[in-house]
Image (spheres, coloured by chain):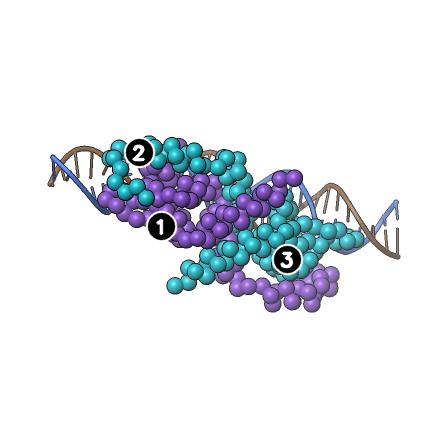
Chain colours: A purple, B cyan, C brown, D blue
Amino acid sequence: MSDNFENGQVHQDLVMKLQAQMPDETKLYDLAELYKVFGDSTRIRIMYVLFDDEVCVYDIAATLNMTQSAISHQLRILKQNRLVKGRRVGKQIYYSLDDEHVRSIIAMGREHLEEDDR
Amino acid sequence: MSDNFENGQVHQDLVMKLQAQMPDETKLYDLAELYKVFGDSTRIRIMYVLFDDEVCVYDIAATLNMTQSAISHQLRILKQNRLVKGRRVGKQIYYSLDDEHVRSIIAMGREHLEEDDR
DNA sequence: TCAACATATGAGCAATTGTTCATATGATTA
DNA sequence: TAATCATATGAACAATTGCTCATATGTTGA
């Protein structure tokens, strides 16, 4: 790799320009981490369940036909990334989407997929 | 929202309503697959390199300080998901973003992250 | 206080994933 | 044609991930 760099097979000036344009490494890493959360169908399904409703853990599990434990594990990840939030009411905890961006991000993905149908 | 319902373990009617609202399983799976592609920092970095420029494989590799092979493997995944496209010019293949949605999806993620700074 | 319920969490395992290494395919030019 | 450059790809490996099972934490009411 660096051999080729030295041998000038690489467009030096373009590469330098591109490197200068790159955002902060940490930002890119965090961005990837965020999308990783969306990149699991269980979590996507949970977010769809919460799209318009506030739902407690057991009902999410029942809706998706999965165990309470599996849902709880995923909710933790969603919560850590501020994609969902929980509100305690007695013994139960009602979950809902944390902000509008969640809906927007999902909508963007759907648009891309629609365009793929051809 | 419906506050005080009956104390059954599962709120049957809510669950039935939620299940009826759920989109097609296949769509949700595809959506997760799409976001999975965004969920890797190497691929995110590649997409940023291609944000405004058409760049050949070797230059992408040089910009990101990675091997040509690693980049090529990731480009294949990006290509399969129609996130980037390649244009052959002689021996080289110039890659660029495939459509506007790629930029939009990245922008949405960034907005969410900005809001997290607090 | 205890029992019942709702949710969270740690350990372990199978499945998936990203990189490296070696090699193959494809394109140009001597 | 052969030699070389540019990119693609298959196999192998380590690292990560999502689920299950068992158990822990937290809440309410008797």
Along the viewing direction, whichever of A55 and B69 lies nearer the viewer = A55
In front: mark 2 or mark 3? Answer: 2
Residue type indicated by callout 1: Lys
Query: Residue B10 got which mark?
Result: 2
**x, y percentage for residue A74?**
40, 43
Classify residue B60 by image quadrant.
bottom right
Residue at image mark 3: B50
Q: CA distance from mark 2 to mark 3?
A: 49 Å
Quadrant in which the N terminus of chain B is drawn: top left
Label 2: which secondary element: loop
Residue kind at label 3, given as amino acid type: Leu
Place of residue A63 in the rendered image (x, y in percent of width and height, measured from the top left): 39, 34
Three-letter code, disc 2 = Val
Give the class, few, some or many, for how many residues have Cα within 10 Å of label 3's Cα (few <14, many ≥20): many
Whether residue B110 sits left or right of residue C6 in the image: it is right
Look at the numbered discs 2 and 3 and tell me whether their residues touch, using CB distance below 8 Å.
no
Left or right of residue D23: residue A16:
right
Instruction: List the residue tagged with mark 1.
Output: A85
The disc, 2 or 3, on the residue closer to the chain's N-terminal end is: 2
Whether residue A67 is visible, yes or no, is: no
